[in-house]
Amino acid sequence: MTTNPGPPGGRPQPPPVTEAPHPGPPSGGERDAKDIALDAFRAPEPDGALTTDQGIRVDDTDNSLTVGERGPTLLEDFHLREKLTRFDHERIPERVVHARGAGAYGFFEPYESLAEFTCADFLQEAGRRTPVFVRFSTVQGPRGSADTVRDVRGFATKFYTRQGNYDLVGNNMPVFFIQDAIKFPDFVHAVKMEPHNEIPTGGTAHDTFWDFCSLQPESTHMLMWAMSDRAIPRSFRMMQGFGVHTFRLVTADGRATFVKFHWKPKLGVACQVWDEAQITAGRDPDFHRRDLWEAIEAGEFPEWELGVQLIPEKDEFSFPFDLLDPTKLVPEELVPVRPVGRMVLDRNPENFFAETEQVAFHTANVVPGIDFTNDPLLQGRNFSYLDTQLIRLGGPNFSQLPVNRPLAEVRTDQRDGYGQQVIHSGTSYAPNSVGGGCPATLGGGRLAEGVFEHYQERVDGQAIRRRSPSFADHYGQAALFWRSMAGWEQEHIIAAFSFELGKVGDQAVRHRMVANLARVDQELAVEVARRIGEPEPAPEPAPDRPTGDREAGAVGERVSPALSLENLHGHGIRTRKVAVLVAQGVDAAQVRAARTALRAEGATVETLARYGGSVAGSDGQDVEVDRALATTASVLYDAVVVPDGAEDVLVVEPDAVRFVNEALRHGKPVAALGTGTALLRAAGAREAEQLAGVALCGPDRQPGASFWEDFVHLIEQHRFPQR
Ligand code: HDD
């Protein structure tokens, strides 16, 4: 039996019942309007007396009320019943897709006014900040799945604008698996864990997914992205975001321009390699979530540039694909991305459930000046997101939850429902006279005054269930993507297809999929077939391909350099993690020099040794150990330094050998100083001086400033996959 003893020296004295002060935000810089609005909902740290939900002070929370010490428990114990009941009801349904995610607050600010194209208030003035909340996610896995699985990443942004909430609910890939929302339940049933045994968690390497895709060739372009390294990002902070659909920007006088939205990470795009991603899933299943959290806590605020591709309405039909088809992108070489603003995430949420879990995005949350197109995927999404919140968040009042509340004033005739937080007064119908006609509609033609008016597109047609023939080319852009990849990217794609299809048991599915790949590229299909033991596919003509393999195609049609990771590197090494392996006898001056040089560039440098504490350096000074090797792993770092002097200990330390072996296998930059090269050899590197991305400093020499400069440059390049 345990009792809460309270502080030493007697029974705890509960403090007087007072209004507790607001704790304020946990991290971050300036307080914005959303942050201040959340104060009204922030509960103080509970440092006073324990109470029930009714505010009754509780005498004991460790023992149920019983008849005698060994007797039955009394129903009268309202504290016991409340405690268990509340616990029993703590869970809500996870999101049907995108269940696992992490979020943060921040702001968006335009570089320039976009008034020429849109009357959206938050895009009118350079430098005017709009608070945002962003949630990143994986798609397939449940809430508890690993972060680094091969999957698409969600990138959903809620802008708390003065005209109401605008949600840009995108992904880290610019296209999607299907063209019409009516296929979404089919697609999700196929991609999610298989129904009989709920395997696999968080992955696409299973029969039902590939069965669906092999029969639904419109998924082919997206498959190329999903099998590329984009599906295994290094961090949320290092991936792009895309609105995917073509939307409309609309001016106050009703002029529309088609628009595609892009988020470009300031740190550049960086990905893991597949073996690394799989090991990370075990070593740190929270890898991305932790990275985002820690970066913000450290004041290294992630930043993206918002870019737009603007397409005049008159050019709607001037592309060899349909702008309404969400399986197509608009090559940046055909329509450049114009940078229009930046988004910075500078504040972590205080409570995961209250904020990140309860945030509700909806593609139909648009503000005056931003409008939809007839993309059939978007149209269905505009139904689905509201609908899903009703079950997930338990009723129609979810927009009153703190994270979802707009900063703009809300005046509706909507009433009641589960969890109503507002004590409404007055009328709730229109037209009314007793309420003075309020809340009143303001009439059309007033976009400039912040009144949403749907874009007046002229549409005429018969009700038909048929896909437009302009959506029929399922391979042209898949081939464009393939051709635009560097050699090593193509190799990774081949390896990914081979891994995934290699796990498919149904021969017919593999066969169909290889035949589909042959319509993208014969070499790709032949190589995948070879690796999974399928017969070589016959060349496929792909008759429905208007863009096809036109040899004379323009850049952007034949090849799009903007798609290759080779062209998406960031500048500098801010927030990259570098491990320095140390042991007894290590050259302490080199460890200090590495720390100083790399930290000066913004990297995080950690010393790792067999045990925590410190090791004695060669100059007699202790070198502090940041982490014991057993508590971390090579996959959690971007680069490794092996200083001089400790090789005797390190080469017989299995964790150290494995650490370097993995870093080498995963193409990471490695610096070996003096006798440190012995560890590279022990880790399997025969001719280290020949390896790309390996920096060596010979024995009896000390690495100077230029050595570290060169090493920084290697880290900047992120990976050396050609190794
Ligand atoms: Fe979706 C969640 C992105 C197609 C139906 N979707 C969801 C989230 C993201 C996307 C980022 C997570 C939001 C969050 O963090 O809470 N979805 C996309 C993109 C799509 C897409 C970029 C294609 C361009 N989605 C799509 C279709 C449908 C849905 C076609 C249904 C017809 N999506 C949902 C949903 C979810 C969702 C079931 C699950 C949880 C939620 O909405 O709030 O309604």
Image (cartoon, rainbow, N blue to C red):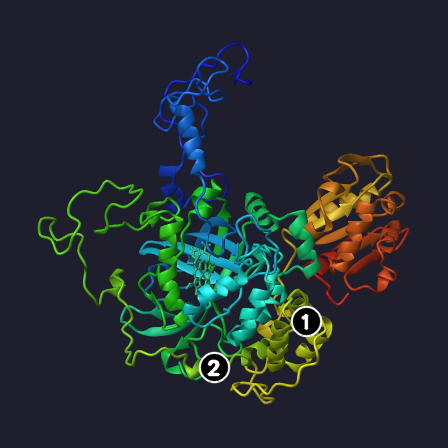
Q: Is residue 407 above or below residue 12?
A: below
Q: Horizontally, is 224 left or right of 181 in the view? A: right
**Residues at circles 2 and 1 in contact by the CB criterion of under 8 Å:** no
Residue sitting at the far left: 433
Give the x, y percent position of residue 225: 58, 69
* Mark 2 Cα shell of 10 Å, populated few (<14), some (14-19), many (≥20): some
Name the residue that disc number 1 marks: 494
Tell me what residue is drawn at x 72 percent, y 40 percent.
627
Res. 221 in view: no
Quadrant of the displayed image that contains ligand 1: bottom left
Sequence-first disc among 2 and 1: 2
Q: Secondary structure at mark 2?
A: loop
Q: Indicate the amino acid at tag 2.
A: Ala
- From mark 2 to mark 1, how far is it between C-alphas? 25 Å
Q: Nearer the viewer, residue 39 or 60?
A: 60
Report the amino acid beneath label 1.
Ile
Q: Position of residue 612 (x, y in %)?
A: 75, 36
Please say whether residue 266 is visible from this viewpoint. yes
Q: Which mark is residue 472?
A: 2
Where residue 422 sits, quadrant-wise, is: top left
Callout 1: few (<14), some (14-19), or many (20+) C-alpha neighbours within 10 Å? many
435 horizontally vs 508: left or right? left
Residue 642: give x, y in percent of width and height.
Answer: 81, 49
Q: Quadrant of the C terminus?
A: bottom right
325, above or below 120, in the image: below
Q: Quadrant of the N terminus?
A: top right
Residue located 62% across and 79% down the image:
515
SS for tag 1? helix
